[in-house]
Image (cartoon, rainbow, N blue to C red):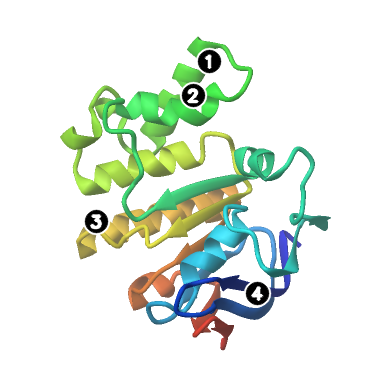
Amino acid sequence: MLLRVEKISKKYLHTDGPVNALKDITFDIEEGMFVTITGPSGAGKSTLLLTLGGLIHPTSGRIFFRDQTLYPSFHNGLAGFRCKHVGFVMQNFSLIPYLSALRNVMIPLSLQKMDKDVQRKRAIDLLDSVGLKDRINHLPRELSAGQQQRVAIARAIANNPSLILADEPTGNLDPSLAQEILELLKVLNTERGITVIMVTHSPAAAAFGKVRIRLVEGRLVQ
C-alpha cells in the first residue's frame, strides 16, 4: 500500500467562523494507481492533494506512506519526504521565468549530491522524454502552454518520485493540448509505475482514473 488515509480532517479558522475543508476522509491508494479527485469548487480537492504531499497539515487524522507515519514526522521531515518521493505538477506550471527549460528541470537535481554534468545530462534526457530536447535553452515565455507543462512534468520526475500530485494540470490548456498532457501522465503511470493523483474538474480527465475519488463539501462521497 502506497498511501493510507485515516479520518483526515482539516479546519481553517476564519473571521466569519471555522471552515471545515476536509471532514473525516478515509481511503487507501495502492502502488501504481492513477487516481482522480473530482468535485465542485470548494469541495476540498486541492486541500486534500496538498495534505497528501505534506504541504498542509491536517487538523486531525493520520496518513501513512508505505506503512510509515507521514504526520507528524517522516524520517528527516516532510521536506525530505517531498524531495525524495513526490513530484508536483500545478495548473500554472510554477516554472521560474528567468531560467531556461533545462535549468528549471535541474532545480530538484541540484538538491542532491550530484555532479553538475550528470545533472545536466539527466535534465536533457528528461526533456527529451517529454519531446522538448530542441527547447532546452528556451525560457518559459518562449514556450507554449503545453510545452511549459511538459517542462513542469520533466521537473516533477527528475528525482524518480514514487508519486506525482497534479492539481488541475490541464486547466490552462485547450482540449488537444490537455489530451497530450493526460496521455503523458498515463505513460509515466503505466510504463514507469509512478502513482498519479490528479485533481480535475474535467470529466474527460477524470476518465483516466483507475480509482476515482469524489468530494462534496469536504466529505468523501465516492
- Amino acid type at mark 3: Leu
Q: Which one is in front, 59 or 132?
A: 59
Please say if 83 is above or below 101.
below
Residue placed at 26% from the left, 22% from the top? Answer: 137
**One can see residue 130 in this view:** yes
- Secondary element at image label 2: helix
Residue at 25 percent of width and 28 percent of height: 135
Disc 3 element: helix
Say the numbered circle drawn on residue 213. Answer: none
Decide which of tag 3 and tag 1 comes sooner along the chain: 1
Between the residue at mark 3 and the residue at mark 2, the CA separation in whole angstroms equals 25 Å
Q: Position of residue 129 (x, y in %)?
A: 41, 36
Q: Nearer the viewer, residue 16 or 64?
A: 16
Q: Residues within 10 Å of mark 1 (few under 14, many from 20)?
A: few
Between the C-alphas of marks 2 and 1, the distance is 6 Å
User: Which residue is depicted at the point 51% across and 81% down?
Assistant: 214
Residue for badge 4: 9
Q: Which mark is residue 118?
A: 1
Question: Reading the chain from its start, which is encountered first: label 1 or label 4?
Answer: 4
Q: Are marks 4 and 3 in contact (CB under 8 Å)?
A: no
Q: Identify the image quadrant of the C terminus.
A: bottom right
The amino acid marked with disc number 4 is: Ser
Q: Which residue is mark 2?
A: 122
Q: Is residue 121 above or below residue 108?
A: above
Q: Secondary structure at mark 1?
A: helix
Indicate the position of residue 159 as horizontal and vertical percent values: 57, 34
